[in-house]
Amino acid sequence: MKSNKQRRQEIKSRRVQRAERQARHANMRPVDRPIGVVVVTPARLQSTNSYGIPDFVQRGYYQDRPFHCKDCGKAEVWTAAQQQWWYEEARGDVWTIAVRCRVCRQYERARRVEARQVHLAGLAAKQARIESAKHSVN
Ligand SMILES: [Zn+2]
């Protein structure tokens, strides 16, 4: 078991490493930064129970990924930077990839929120009917 002191030191060292990494990236001249390529930091990825290794982890870097939106068919590029954000900042599932363009993604999100509200309202109405039936029997 780790002591609080050890934990604090771990947290501190991680913060220092992150700050150094960000400083390195900021100091890099734009010409040195490979276009459309971002290095993968496997320690920051969401853990997975799979025995497989995603292709970008094997490769060691994210690269721009062209695709067609599954809803409207528009040609889009899921950039290396967006992939890094999704996998390392948002801690998205490492087996997921972008399938919708930005606009369709926003529509889909709104649609899901609305569907959930309809579902919950339906559940509440059903529960209210059950409760009132109970009271009418007794
Ligand atoms: Zn679309």
Image (cartoon, rainbow, N blue to C red):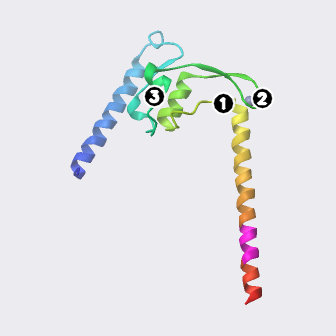
| Relative height, residue 65 to residue 12 (above, below) | above
Q: Please tell me how many numbered marks the rendered image carries.
A: 3
Of the four image quadrants, the one with ligand 1 is top right
Residue that badge 1 annotates: 99
Amino acid type at image mark 1: Val
Q: Is residue 64 above or below residue 50?
A: above
Along the viewing direction, whichever of 116 and 7 lies nearer the viewer: 116
Identify the residue shown where x is 69% and y is 31%.
100
> At x 66% / y 22%, what residue is drawn?
67
Residues at marks 2 and 3, CA–CA distance in whole angstroms: 30 Å
- Queried on whether the Cβ of the residue with tag 1 lies below 8 angstroms from ligand 1, the answer reads no
The magenta stretch is 124-130
Q: Residue at x 27, y 46 (%)?
A: 8
Mark on residue 59?
Answer: none
Which residue is label 3 attached to?
Answer: 53
Dot 2: what SS? loop
